[in-house]
Image (spheres, rainbow, N blue to C red):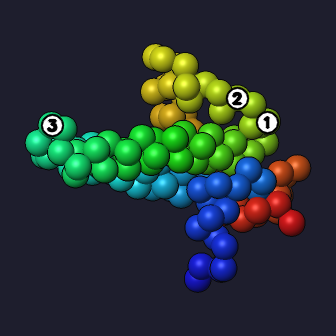
C-alpha cells in the first residue's frame, strides 16, 4: 500500500533506497511520458498554438525528467551502498546505457545499510 508522499519521494527525493524494479518502472514511465509529448508535438501543424503548447510541455517534462532521473539514480546507488555522486554516469554518452543496465540488474543490499533500513523507502 502506498503511503502519502511516496510518489513524490520516488521521483523527487534523494534520501533512502529504491529497488531495481521501482527504478526501471519509474524510468520507463518518464520515458513514455516524454515520448508521448514529443509524439503529440509532431502531430500538430508547424507554428500552430497547439504545436507550441506541446513543445513547451515536452521541454518542461524533459527538465523534470532529468531531475527525477538523478533522484532515482542516487537512490538506486544507495540501495547497494554506493554514494549518489556516481549517478552522474547516467549522463555520460555511451556510459549511460551501461550504467542504466547495471542499475537495473545489480542486486541491492539485503539488509539495512548506511542509506536506510529497507528498500523503497526514505531513510528514517
Residue at the spot x=22%, y=51% of the render? 50
Task: Tell me if label 1 and label 2 are in contact, CB under 8 Å.
Answer: yes
Residue in view at x 88 percent, y 50 percent: 114
Q: Is residue 17 visible?
A: no
Query: What is the quadrant of the N terminus in the image?
Result: bottom right
Q: Quadrant of the C terminus?
A: bottom right
Marks 2 and 3, the one that precedes in the sequence: 3
What residue is shown with label 2?
Answer: 86
Q: In what element is the residue under mark 2? A: helix
Q: Is 72 left or right of 60, judged from the image as shown?
A: right
Which quadrant of the view contains residue 74? top right
List the residue tagged with mark 3.
46
Which structural element holds mark 1?
loop
Give percent across and percent down for residue 32: 33, 51
Quick check: marks 1 and 3 in contact, CB under 8 Å? no
Q: Nearer the viewer, mark 1 or mark 3?
A: 3
Please give the residue where the numbered disc 1 appears in the rendered image. 83
Task: Name the outermost residue toward the bottom.
Answer: 1
Q: Marks 1 and 2, Cα distance to the nearest angstrom?
A: 6 Å
CA–CA distance between discs 2 and 3? 40 Å
Q: Tag 3, which secondary structure?
A: loop
Query: Quick one: label 1, few (<14), some, or many (20+) residues within 10 Å?
Result: some
Amino acid at each position: 500500500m502506498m503511503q502519502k508522499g511516496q510518489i513524490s519521494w520516488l521521483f523527487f527525493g534523494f534520501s533512502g533506497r529504491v529497488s531495481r524494479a521501482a527504478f526501471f518502472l519509474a524510468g520507463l514511465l518518464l520515458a513514455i511520458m516524454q515520448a508521448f509529448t514529443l509524439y503529440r508535438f509532431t502531430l500538430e501543424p508547424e507554428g500552430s498554438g497547439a504545436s507550441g503548447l506541446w513543445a513547451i510541455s515536452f521541454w518542461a517534462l524533459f527538465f523534470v525528467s532529468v531531475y527525477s532521473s538523478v533522484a532515482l539514480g542516487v537512490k538506486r546507488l544507495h540501495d547497494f551502498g554506493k554514494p549518489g555522486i556516481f549517478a552522474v554516469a547516467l549522463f555520460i554518452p555511451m556510459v549511460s546505457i551501461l550504467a542504466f543496465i547495471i542499475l537495473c540488474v545489480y542486486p541491492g543490499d539485503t539488509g539495512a545499510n548506511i542509506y536506510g533500513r529497507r528498500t523503497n523507502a526514505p531513510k528514517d
